[in-house]
Amino acid sequence: MKSRVPYLIALGSMVAALLVLGMNTFLAALSDAMVRTAGIIMMADLVYLSYFTAKHKKKSVLSSTRNEEV
């Protein structure tokens, strides 16, 4: 359960960054600094979410193979 909290925070910040970029595209032009900050947050979140997802998938595959051996 502990490891899901940072994942959910990263997922929430990714959604927030996407909303900011969507607002910039469809509603009103935002400042350059705001758009760049949202992009940097998205890049960092993408790295973290990819790592966490791969780690979680690997752990679930290993646990399922251990259950099959028993």
Image (tube, helix red, strand yellow):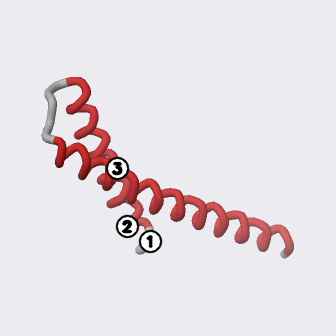
Disc number at residue 14? 3
Q: Is the residue 59 above or below the residue 43 in the image? A: below
Query: Residue, x 27% and y 32% (percent of image)?
Result: 22
Image quarter of residue 19: top left
Query: Pointer 1: what residue?
Result: 3
Percent position (x, y) of residue 54? 60, 61
- Out of 18 and 60, give the one closest to the viewer: 18
Percent position (x, y) of residue 65? 79, 68
Q: Residues within 10 Å of mark 1 (few under 14, many from 20)?
A: few
Query: Residue, x 37% and y 66% (percent of image)?
Result: 5
Q: In the rendered structure, which amino acid carries the disc numbered 2?
A: Pro
- Looking at marks 2 and 3 on the same chain, the residue that comes earlier in the sequence is marked by 2
Q: In the rendered structure, which amino acid carries the disc numbered 1?
A: Ser
Q: Is the residue 13 above or below the residue 28 in the image? A: below
Q: Are marks 2 and 3 in contact (CB under 8 Å)?
A: no
Image quarter of residue 61: bottom right
> In the image, 55: left or right of 1?
right
Query: Pointer 2: what residue?
Result: 6
